[in-house]
């Protein structure tokens, strides 16, 4: 904990971490909010799955593109423009009742304009702290990210079930606009310039650690999204049980991030952390009893934030600074698509097999998330005793001064 408190005392770290957290909260809210809203309006989880698929396609295309554009146009112009268009598109889905094809078209626009806040902040971090602080900073950020992916759906669930699904979506828009404005006001966005990458788009995925983090991040977040859909379906739209279970899931992730995030990162690290997620999810799938789910989803959550911290560190240590934004763009795209795909797959299984189908999907995705880093261990760098900072570029670039 002393290393984390020292980080938060470093000038600007706590502020920019909080700002990006608020701005990115909708990323953990919209998939579930859309699922609940479209299911209520059209009485079909399958229809909701189609809308989420359109959203995920937009995110898949936009993630690395908008991240790369920040090296050409700057962070502030790209983030400002995408926030504006995305907020309008998401609001239309909430306020205008449309056919499924029309809703899919608007969801595609929303996905295409998801602001690249995650790549921006992860590019800034190495310029705010020294090399010894970088891995603990990624661990702390991973714990904060789990507030997005796990607590975000809790807020969405309570709002959508107790107030309304329209309000659940509009709350996400409020976080997007308010948090985005706070993040854009951070002076670091003007002090750090991302050098323009000279390589073709997608070339960074030829680096095995980046590809590994993208694949495993997709599987991990997809499993979480399937769990969220299953919990909501199991306990209905009128009770508080779903929110309680998801809150306990979130606490598990936060505990894991703070307790395990500082451990050395060896070549087995990602597989070990994903094993925790798989075991907890698989055992949770045995029963839909509220306390059974709470206990074993807490266990599954313990592995989530540490796994994400490993992904961020292996990516950072494997790319040049000019490639960091695009690399994190691909990793973020994998996670965002995972959220949409996990919810969509769970929706189809819920329609055909009931709430238990969603947990089967989640367990299967978590198993793949364990097997991939286990079988591809040679792609995983051993960072014990190594600096996790990006490889310097030869051209000069601006840095944040303390």
Image (cartoon, rainbow, N blue to C red):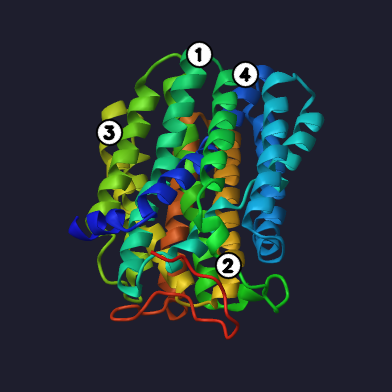
Q: Residue at x 59, y 67 (%)?
A: 193
Q: Which residue is mark 3?
A: 292
Q: Residues within 10 Å of mark 1 (few under 14, many from 20)?
A: few
The tag on residue 40 is 4
Q: Which residue is mark 1?
A: 163
Q: Which residue is mark 2?
A: 327
Which residue in the rendered view is the most extreme toward the left? 2
Which of the two marks, 4 or 3, is nearer to us in this view? 4
Q: CA distance from mark 2 to mark 1?
A: 39 Å
Q: Position of residue 177 (x, y in %)?
A: 59, 35
Q: Position of residue 326 (x, y in %)?
A: 62, 66
Label 3, secondary structure: give it.
helix
Q: Residue at x 33, y 27 (%)?
A: 244
First of labels 4, 1 by sequence position: 4
In this rendered view, identify the residue nearer to me: 242 or 110.
110
First of labels 4, 3 by sequence position: 4
């Amino acid at each position: 904990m002393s290393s984390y408190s020292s980080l938060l005392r470093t000038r600007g770290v706590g502020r920019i971490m909080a700002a990006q957290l608020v701005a990115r909260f909708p990323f953990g809210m919209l998939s579930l909010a859309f699922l609940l809203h479209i299911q209520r309006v059209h009485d079909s989880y399958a229809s909701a799955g189609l809308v989420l698929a359109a959203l995920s396609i937009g995110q898949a295309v936009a993630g690395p593109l908008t991240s790369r554009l920040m090296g050409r146009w700057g962070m502030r112009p790209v983030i400002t423009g995408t926030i504006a268009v995305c907020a309008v598109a998401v609001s239309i889905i909430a306020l205008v009742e449309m056919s499924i094809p029309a809703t899919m078209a608007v969801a595609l626009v929303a996905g295409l304009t998801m602001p690249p806040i995650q790549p921006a902040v992860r590019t800034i971090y190495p310029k705010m702290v020294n090399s010894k602080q970088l891995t603990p900073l990624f661990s702390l950020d991973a714990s904060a990210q789990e507030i997005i992916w796990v607590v975000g759906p809790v807020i969405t669930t309570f709002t959508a079930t107790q107030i309304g699904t329209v309000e659940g979506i509009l709350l996400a828009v409020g976080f997007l606009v308010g948090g985005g404005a706070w993040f854009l006001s951070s002076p670091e966005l003007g002090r750090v310039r991302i050098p323009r990458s000279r390589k073709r788009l997608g070339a960074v995925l030829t680096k095995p650690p980046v590809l590994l983090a993208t694949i495993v991040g997709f599987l991990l977040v997809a499993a979480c999204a399937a769990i969220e859909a299953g919990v909501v379906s199991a306990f209905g739209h009128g009770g508080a049980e779903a929110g309680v279970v998801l809150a306990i899931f979130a606490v598990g992730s936060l505990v894991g991030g703070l307790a395990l995030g500082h451990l050395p990162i060896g070549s087995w690290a990602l597989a070990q952390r994903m094993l925790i997620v798989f075991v907890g999810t698989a055992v949770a799938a045995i029963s839909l009893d509220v306390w059974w789910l709470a206990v074993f989803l807490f266990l599954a959550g313990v592995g989530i934030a540490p796994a994400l911290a490993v992904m961020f560190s292996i990516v950072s240590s494997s790319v040049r600074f000019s490639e960091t934004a695009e690399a994190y763009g691909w990793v973020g795209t994998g996670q965002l698509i995972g959220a949409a795909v996990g919810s969509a797959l769970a929706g189809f299984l819920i329609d055909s097999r009931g709430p238990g189908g969603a947990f089967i999907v989640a367990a299967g995705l978590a198993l793949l998330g364990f097997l991939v880093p286990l079988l591809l261990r040679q792609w995983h760098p051993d960072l014990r005793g190594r600096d996790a900072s990006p490889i310097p570029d030869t051209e000069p670039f601006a840095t944040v001064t303390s």
